[in-house]
Image (tube, grey):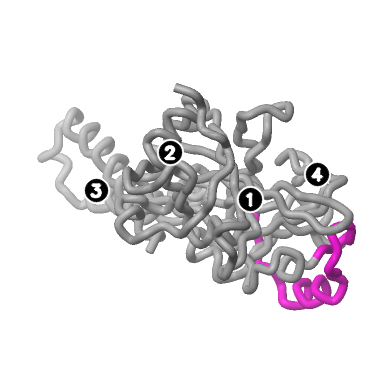
Amino acid sequence: MAAPENRFKIIGTTTEQRKKIRGDYLICVSPIVKQGLRLRKFAVIVHSVSDNEKSKELKVICNIKTDHHLSEDTVAADQSVRNAIGIPVLYDREQIFVSIYPLSVTFMQRLFQYVSQILGRRFLFFRLGKADISDMEKDIARIPKDAFSLLGTEIGNKVVIENAFRIKDGDKFIIKKLSIKCYELLPEIEKRRKEFEEASFTARFPNAEILLKVSPDISKVFLDAHGRDQLGINANGPLLDAVRIRRHLVDLFLREFREFGIIFFLSLLTIIQLIPKDNIKWPISVLIFFVSILLSLFVVLMNIRARIK
């Protein structure tokens, strides 16, 4: 079977299509398109935008789902996906086209996807912006305050920023990621940045809302040049890239265990000390010790899971 032309009209996803999609963004395609493009569970959706001077390829990572009701020239995508790749809320469906490419995922990345689903996971899209001068070379990122609770983490914790990176201008993408401490985007930084933004693709600080005609646009994440380089972001092109962010589970687990798990563990040991020693043999003491550790770990993991509302 010949591969379908990689140029599709785009519509919104339905409630029925989004069933069982937990914390992920979704693209729906017909079974023929999925087979023809050799798509698996994850893919990258791409939309090119331009002005009179430059063009920009906007792309994001999404889950793939098949829908027999979709035609072969149309795909469905979440509203957040369409906004991230520069498609306004109101648009001409006969004039806007997107492409979809396979995402190469390693075994460890695939394993993490399953583990993170169990512990709770939510991705958020952010428009990449240059860090404020005061934040450069500090190995930190900044996002709006309300994003932390949506991600299920806290200010000052690590997050994972992921970017879809094209392999040598080919038809495949890989995930480039950056683990970094994240802090609140202060109002004075946001205000100062808006004062310098310009409606030009060649501007140092391009105004995404005006250029992409997406209003309101997705939230911004501010990152310095070293961080953007690790994500494979082209430093010479207009900075309108969309990335996705999730909480850093290992970092969060270690923090939760230090702050809560150890206290819980010590409390259990204290209770054990109240039991007369004559009634406890050493094998039972060892058993109680390990059960205490397991209970502490369980409570910490449930607390991490509960952070995703």
Q: Earlier in the sequence, mark 2 or mark 3?
A: 2
Q: Horizontal and vertical percent for residue 170?
A: 68, 27
Q: Please state which amino acid type lies under the numbered disc 4.
A: His
Compared to residue 103, the image places residue 193 above or below, namely below
Q: Nearer the viewer, mark 1 or mark 3?
A: 1
Farthest front residue in view: 94
Tag 4 near tag 1, CB within 8 Å: no
Q: Earlier in the sequence, mark 3 or mark 4?
A: 4
Q: Please state which amino acid type lies under the numbered disc 2.
A: Gln
Gap in angstroms between the C-alphas marked 3 and 4: 52 Å
Q: Nearer the viewer, mark 3 or mark 4?
A: 4
Give the class, few, some or many, for how many residues have Cα within 10 Å of label 1's Cα (few <14, many ≥20). many
Q: Earlier in the sequence, mark 4 or mark 2?
A: 2
Residue designated by label 1:
243
Residue designated by label 3:
273
Q: Please state which amino acid type lies under the numbered disc 3.
A: Gln
Magenta segment:
181-206
Q: Earlier in the sequence, mark 1 or mark 2?
A: 2
Residue designated by label 2:
113
Q: Quadrant of residue 174?
A: top right
Residue designated by label 4:
226
Tag 4 near tag 2, CB within 8 Å: no
